Image: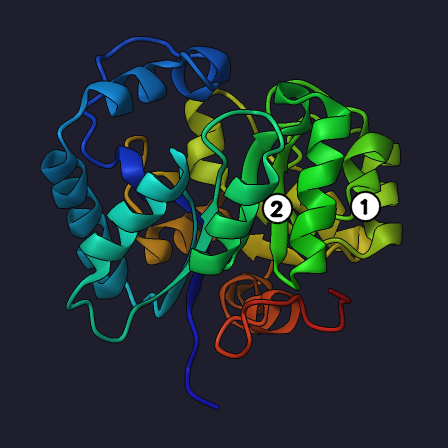
Amino acid sequence: MARTCCNCHTHLGDAFISLPEQAWTVEELVAPPDGYKHRMLRDADRSEVIRGIRRALHAMRESGVTHFVDFREDGITGVELLKAAMDGMDNLTAVIMARPREERYNEAEIDMLLDHADGIGVSSAADWSYGQLQKVATHTRRRGKQFGLHASESVRENIDMVLGLQPSFLVHLCRATDDDLQAVADAGVPVAVCPRANAFFGLRPPVERMRELGIPLLLGTDNAMIVSPNIRDEMAYVREHFDVSLEDVQAMTAVNPRKYLNVGGNIHQRAGGSP
C-alpha cells in the first residue's frame, strides 16, 4: 500500500486572513455566520482566497501530507474554490466536506453538494435546528458519504444528540465529560483533534483519556489562519504536550485515516459503515 499521511481536519479557506493581535474566543473568531473569519470571507476577493489556499496546500505537501480533510464554507462556491486551488497540485488529494450556505436543510442543495464533494461537514449541532440537521445527516448517509461535525469545542454539547446524528467522525471534544467520551467510545466514532489550534483558545483536547477509552484518533491542524497546516509540526506538538507514543501519533495520520475514513481508498463511505 502506498504511504499515506493525512491532515484530518483543515479549514484552508481562511489561510489568506492575517489575524489582529488580540485575545479571541472561538465564538468571536470562527462561529457562523458573523465570526471574524466569516466576515472576512464574505468581503474577500475570490483570487485572494485561492492564493491563500494554494500557499496552505504547498505547506501541507512540503510537510509530507498526501491527503487532507477540508471543511468548506459557502456552499458550492466554497467547493469550487478549493477545486480551483487544487489545480496542478500533484500527489495531494482533498477529501472535501461541503457545508450548506445556511443552517437549514435544502434537499436540492445537499444533493448538489454531494455530487461534487465527499461529504458534509458542519460547524456544530448547536448552530442548527436539530430536526433540520437530522435531515442533512440522513440525506448524507443515504448517499453513502461522510457526515462530520465539530462537537464540544469550547462549550459542552449534548453528546446523545450529537451521536444521534450517526456521524462518520467528530472534531475536538475539548469540553466533553468523561461520560461523554465513554459514549463516543461505545459508539465507535473517530475523533479528529487539533491541539495547536485548540491551544490558541486556551483549550486542550483530552487525548490521553480518549486513547485510554479506545476512541479512534485522527490528527488535524484546523484553521490555517491560526496555525500552519504543517502536519509534522502538529505531530511534534502532540509528542511534546501529551502522554502518547510516537506510534500513536503516527497512527493518527496514517493507519486511522485509512481505516476509519477510507482515505487512500473509497473516501465516499466510512469503512465498515452503511450508506
- Identify the element where label 2 is drawn: strand
Q: Do the numbered discs 1 and 2 sit on residues whose CB atoms are within 8 Å? A: no
Label 1: element kind: helix
User: Based on the displayed image, in which of its 4 quarters is residue 58 positioned?
Assistant: bottom left
Residue 263 in the image: above or below residue 135: below
1 vs 2, front mark: 2
Residue topped by disc 1: 184
Q: Is residue 155 above or below residue 218?
A: above
Mark carried by residue 148: 2
**What color scheme is it?**
rainbow
**Eyeballing the image, is 66 above or below 12?**
below
Residue at 75% x, 36% y is: 134
- Gap in angstroms between the C-alphas marked 1 and 2: 14 Å
Query: Residue 262 has which mark?
Result: none
Judge from the rendering whether residue 235 lies leftward or rightward of residue 168; answer left or right.
left
Q: Which amino acid does label 2 sit on?
A: Gly
